[in-house]
Amino acid sequence: MRSVIHFASAALALAALAFTAVPSAVAADKPDPVTDAKAFKNFFTQKFPKVKLEDFVNGPYSMNEDMHRQWEEKEQFPPYEFSLDMGKEMFSKPFKNGKSYADCFPNKGIGIRQNYPYFDDKEGKVVTLELALNRCREANGEPAFSYVKDEMAALTAYMAFTSRGKPFDIKIPDDPRALEAYQNGKRYFYTRRGQLNFSCATCHVQTPGERIRAEVLAPALGILNAMPIYRSEWSGMGTISRRFTTCNSQIRGVPLNPQDDEYRDLEYYLSYVSNGLPLSGLGGCEKGG
Amino acid sequence: MSATDCRFPALAAAKKAADAGDFDKAIASSKEAEALAKASIFQATSEKEAWKALEIR
C-alpha cells in the first residue's frame, strides 16, 4: 500500500515537472504580433457582426441588447464608485517619506493605464501596473499590497478611470525577449490545463456570449480593457491578478502566484491584441465574464 | 493544510487514511492520485504542441 502512495507521489512530482517545462518551450513558428492582433479582431468582429469593435470592452454586456441595457443602467449608479473614491484617496495620500505614487509614474500616474503592461528592457521582463504600484510602494519604504485584495483593486481602478476612453497602446519593442514574452503569454492563453482541461481560449474565444452555469462569458477581445472589474460574485472590485487566479481555480487547475512571469506575459499578450480598443475602466460584471 | 494538501488533495487523503489505518480508502485515494497525475502528465506533454490548434490565425 505504501508503495502505491509512493508511486503516486512520484507520478505527481513528474506531473509538476511536466507543468514547469511547458512555459519554457519555445514554439518553432516565429511570433508575429501584428498579424495576430489583426486576426484576433477579425475573428471576434466576424463572430459578433452586430457588436461594434469598441463595444467588446464591455464584456458580457456587449453580447446582446438586453445585457447592454443592464450595463447602461448600472452606469447610472456604478457599483464600483466606492472603490474609485478609495483609490483616489489612496493615490493622493503621500507615503511616510513624503513622496507619493505620482513620483513613480510618467505624467504623475494620470492617464497612463493604456500603456501597461510594458516590456522593461533593463529587467528583460513584462511590468504590469499592479507590479509597478507595489514596486513604487516598496521603493518608498511601504509594504506591498496583496495583488488580489481591495487596496490594489482600488488603486488600479482609479488609475484606469483616469484613462477611460483612451485606446490600449501596448508596445512590443524590437527585442527578442519582448517577443518571447508575448509568445509565452499567447501559449499560456491557448494551453489547456486543470482537471476540466480548459484553456483561457475555451471560454473566451470558443464560447463568449454563452453561459457557463449562470455566467455569460466575456469575449477575449477587450477583456482587459475593463480591468479592474466589479463582480457581483465578489461583491467588490477585483484586480487582473485576482481574475487570472480565480479563472485557473474555476477550471480546477492550480493557480500560479500573482505576478508570476506567466501571468505577466499573459497580460502582455491579451492587452496587445486589444490595442486600439478604448479602456472602459472600470468594468462591471453580473457574475462571471 | 499544507501546500501539498491543497495541490494534491487525493494524495493528502490517501496519507490521512493510511495514518488512520483505513487502508482500503488509502489505496483507493492513492489510485485516484495516480490517475490524476498521469492525466496531468499527458495533458502537459500533449499541450506543448496542441495549444497551437486553438490559436486564432
Image (spheres, grey):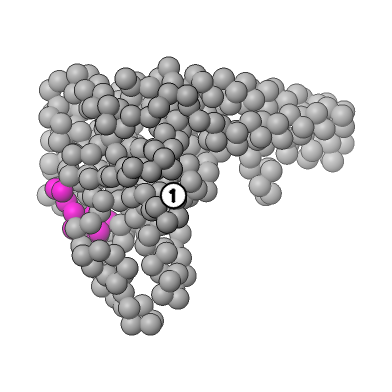
A37 lies left or right of A64: right
Q: Residue at x 36, y 77 (%)?
A: A95
Q: Is residue A149 above or below residue A16?
A: below
Q: Is residue B33 above or below residue A143?
A: above
Figure quadrant of residue B25: top right
Give neighbour class at mark 1: few <14, some 14-19, many 20+ (Cα, 10 Å).
some
Front-lying residue, A61 or A108: A108
Look at label 1 and name its amino acid.
Lys
Q: Is residue A199 visible?
A: no
- Counting from the top left corner in percent of width and height, residue A8 is at 76, 29
B45 lies left or right of B30: left
- Counting from the top left corner in percent of width and height, residue B37 is at 68, 27
Front-lying residue, A130 or A252: A130
Circle 1 SS class: strand
Q: Residue at x 60, y 37 (%)?
A: A20
- Counting from the top left corner in percent of width and height, residue A235 is at 34, 50
Which residues are the magenta region? A157-166
* Residue position for label 1: A125
Q: Residue at x 55, y 35 (%)?
A: A24
